[in-house]
Image: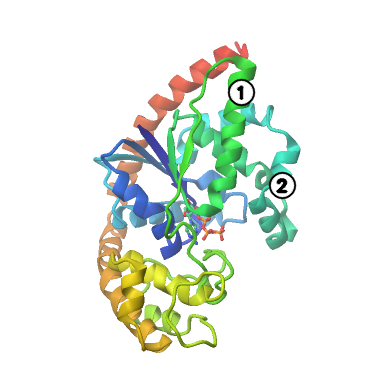
């Protein structure tokens, strides 16, 4: 089975992306042919500083390795290094209805957030994402819940291409978790934890004092009972989800352990758990950041392996479309 997913180099990895997607990636390594990439082309749809961009990509590579990706068990590369992504995106653009792109929730959110820069790339983002996935004949895409709508569009595009030009692409499936597919913001538990609002995120590499500050000030509610109820108690439910996923214990058991105890106690124990569990990530990231040559070599090896698969798909695509 071929498994593929990506992450944008737009900031440090937060526990939302880790629990929703990257933890799945590390668990899937070795179970199939895994391809993970740094989506630097997608990141260009919001303003980036060219002087710092390369460093951001290398930092994301270091963070992915620190989070548990193993280059001996998966292919890791930077999206812009395999030119076939943009070529296929163009072809797919020609069969993607504009209306489908305009109704994408992420486009509508980003267009509101970046009013001064509603560029065509922001609208076409899901087409590039479809190209990323279809280029590798991917079967399974481990992602957070926020990406499911884009995955549905990818399936529509794949079917449309196959219908129009003959069977070419595998139709992929999203792989989302029952628990953790959408980790919520610490300051507004009705919204997704998101790195474009860094103050509401807990990053995988935050120092103990920062973890303490962010968790102790997480928004809960006026009640007292520690109960998993995402509708009535979204803040507490979010903290319980994070607790359960890092501790490996079912939510029910955690609820029982906190019977008769208050929110402050839940937060205190969650801080202790996170300080302990995140320590190896911090340590590995520091070590990897000092090894720039090694990081570049991993990305180069990944590029070479990815390019072989990408070129083979593109030979078939060009032929099917009747190009020279
Ligand atoms: N809060 C989340 N809960 C669960 N999964 C999440 N993912 C992101 N946020 C959460 C999943 O992480 C993977 C990488 O996502 P990305 O590179 O697209 O990250 P992002 O969406 O740029 O990160 P943010 O924080 O969501 O940034 P902005 O502010 O741009 O919206 C994906 O599989 C994603 O589903």
* Secondary-structure class at tag 2: loop
Instruction: Tell me where residue 208 appears, x and y as whole percent.
Output: 33, 79
In the rendered view, would you say 211 is above or below 302?
Answer: below
Choose between 199 and 105: the one closer to the eye.
Answer: 105
**12 relative position to 167: left or right:** left
**45 relative position to 15: left or right:** right
Instruction: Tell me where residue 253 appears, x and y as whole percent.
Output: 31, 72
Seen at 58% across and 67% down, the residue is 191
Between disc 2 and disc 1, whose residue precedes? 2
Seen at 62% across and 19% down, the residue is 163
Image quarter of the N terminus: top left
- Residue identified by numbered label 2: 103
**95 relative position to 61: left or right:** right
Instruction: Tell me where residue 133 appears, x and y as whole percent.
Output: 49, 35
Choose between 118 and 21: the one closer to the eye.
Answer: 21
**Is any part of residue 14 visible from this angle?**
no
Mark-to-mark CA distance, 2 and 1: 21 Å
**Is any part of residue 298 visible from this angle?**
yes
**92 relative position to 310: left or right:** right
Indicate which disc residue 73 carries.
Answer: none
In the rendered view, would you say 304 is above or below 143?
Answer: above
Mark 1 Cα shell of 10 Å, populated few (<14), some (14-19), many (≥20): many
Mark 2 Cα shell of 10 Å, populated few (<14), some (14-19), many (≥20): few
Scheme by which the image is coloured? rainbow
Quarter of the image where one finds residue 138:
top left
- Residue identified by numbered label 1: 161
């Amino acid at each position: 089975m071929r498994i593929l997913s990506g992450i944008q180099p737009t900031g440090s990895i937060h526990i939302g992306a880790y629990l929703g997607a990257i933890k799945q990636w590390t668990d899937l390594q070795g179970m199939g042919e895994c391809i993970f990439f740094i989506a630097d082309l997608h990141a260009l749809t919001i303003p980036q500083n060219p002087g710092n961009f390369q460093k951001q990509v290398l930092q994301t590579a270091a963070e992915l390795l620190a989070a548990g990706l193993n280059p001996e068990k998966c292919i890791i590369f930077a999206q812009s290094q395999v030119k076939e992504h943009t070529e296929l995106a163009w072809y797919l653009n020609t069969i993607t209805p504009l209306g489908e792109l305009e109704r994408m929730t992420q486009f509508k959110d980003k267009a509101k957030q970046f009013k001064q820069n509603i560029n065509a790339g922001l609208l076409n983002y899901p087409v590039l994402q479809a190209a990323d996935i279809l280029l590798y004949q991917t079967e399974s895409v481990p992602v957070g819940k926020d990406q499911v709508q884009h995955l549905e569009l990818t399936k529509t595009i794949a079917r449309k291409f196959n219908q129009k030009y003959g069977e070419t692409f595998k139709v992929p499936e999203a792989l989302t978790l029952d628990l953790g597919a959408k980790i919520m913001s610490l300051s507004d538990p009705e919204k997704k934890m998101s790195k474009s609002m860094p103050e509401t995120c807990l990053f995988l590499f935050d120092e103990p004092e920062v973890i303490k500050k962010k968790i102790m000030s997480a928004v809960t509610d006026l009640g007292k009972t520690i109960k998993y109820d995402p509708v009535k108690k979204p803040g507490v439910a979010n903290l319980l989800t994070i607790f359960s996923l890092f501790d490996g214990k079912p939510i029910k058991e955690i609820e029982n352990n906190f019977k008769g105890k208050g929110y402050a106690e839940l937060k205190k124990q969650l801080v202790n758990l996170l300080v302990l569990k995140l320590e190896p990530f911090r340590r590995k990231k520091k070590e990897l950041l000092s090894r720039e040559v090694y990081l570049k070599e991993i990305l180069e090896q990944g590029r070479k392996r990815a390019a072989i698969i990408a070129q083979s798909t593109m030979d078939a695509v060009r032929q099917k479309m009747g190009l020279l």
